[in-house]
Image: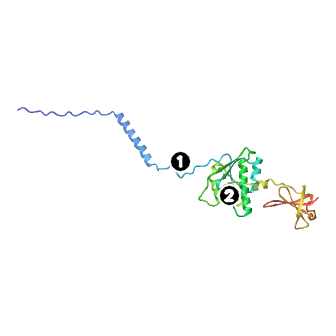
Amino acid sequence: MIESKTPTTPVPVVAKPPAEFTRALAAEIVKNLTSIGRFTARPFIRHKDTDAHAVKEEILGEYPILVDTSVLIDGRILPIANSGFITGTLVIPQFILGELQHIADSDDSLRRAKGRRGLDIVNKLKGQKVNKLLHVKFVSSDPSEIKEVDAKLVTLAKRWANQKIRLLTVDFNLAHVARVQGVKILNINDIAQALKLSLMPGEEFTVRITHEGRERAQGVGYLPDGTMVVVDNARDRVEQDILVIVTKVHQTPAGQLFFARIK
């Protein structure tokens, strides 16, 4: 009997990769899995530049000074600017111009005059060419969620603190509130006080007696900077220029008060 032989399928022989290749492949896989794990585990953070609600910080210029409405109505900022004693960038928000316009449209004649003077000061500051180191910049930034103008100014000053901004005002209450919140303040009234004439007892000067005083036949006059001088026995010297000697200097919250006698 002849046995039939069924042909067998040859078993393919798979070459075993070298050990070095296996180790390198395993290390690469572990590295990739680790990177993917770190990526998926990291919390999603929206980049500020892609946030539709992000507020782009406004570049204010060199040595920025945020201007209050009271400064423009006061008007002394213009001669100070023209004198060259102040340099940098006066930053005037649009809502300040809006408030001036509102005051200028008032039914009250005094308020209307103040508003118009403030707008006139703005135009003169913008057009001044005497002080080349002082510039005016109008900004549209407006914390619309805040209604009060003073609070808007304090908010902007705090927002721009990294630009070393200062708030310029003649409003005592605004200056006090802003200082409490860490805002740097420039007060024109402080400048005025610093520039007042300083006299000592025994010094002589000439003063015009403008009206009678209240006690001891006193007469009252004023120095060019507005400082009051009370002169003994000068009640009958009204409208006269007389030479006096300082006898006493009295410090008040509003400044100095001089007492004197006729020489």
Side (left or right) of 14 relative to 252: left
Where's residue 247, x and y in %?
89, 60
Characterize the local packing of mark 1: few (<14), some (14-19) or many (20 or more) Cα atoms within 10 angstroms: few
Can residue 28 be seen in the rendering of this structure?
Answer: yes
Q: Nearer the viewer, residue 68 or 33?
A: 68
Q: Amino acid at mark 2?
A: Gln
Left or right of 24, for residue 192: right
- Position of the N terminus, as image quadrant, is top left
Ranked by sequence position, the earlier of labels 1 and 2 is 1
The reply to whether callout 1 and callout 2 are in contact (CB within 8 Å) is no
Q: Where in the figure is residue 169, as x and y percent of width and height?
A: 71, 56
Judged left or right of residue 140, residue 10 is left
Residue 155 placement: quadrant: bottom right
Q: Which residue is mark 2?
A: 101
Cα distance in 3D space between marks 1 and 2: 36 Å
Query: In the displayed image of the protein, which residue is found farthest to the left?
Result: 1
> Residue 165, position in %: x, y?
67, 50
According to the picture, the residue beneath numbered tag 1 turns out to be 49
Quadrant of the image containing the C terminus: bottom right
User: How did the renderer colour the structure?
Assistant: rainbow
Residue at (51, 48) in percent of width and height: 50
User: Nearest the camera: 230 or 1?
Assistant: 230
In this rendering, would 96 be left or right of 7?
A: right
Q: Residue furthest right?
A: 263
**Residue type marked 1:** Asp
Residue furthest to the bottom in view is 215
Given residues 67 and 37, the one toward you in this image is: 67
Vertical position of residue 27 compared to residue 224: above or below: above
Q: Nearer the viewer, residue 200 or 45?
A: 45
Classify mark 2: helix, strand or loop.
helix
Q: Position of residue 124 (x, y in %)?
A: 73, 50
At 63% across and 54% down in the image, what residue appears?
Answer: 156
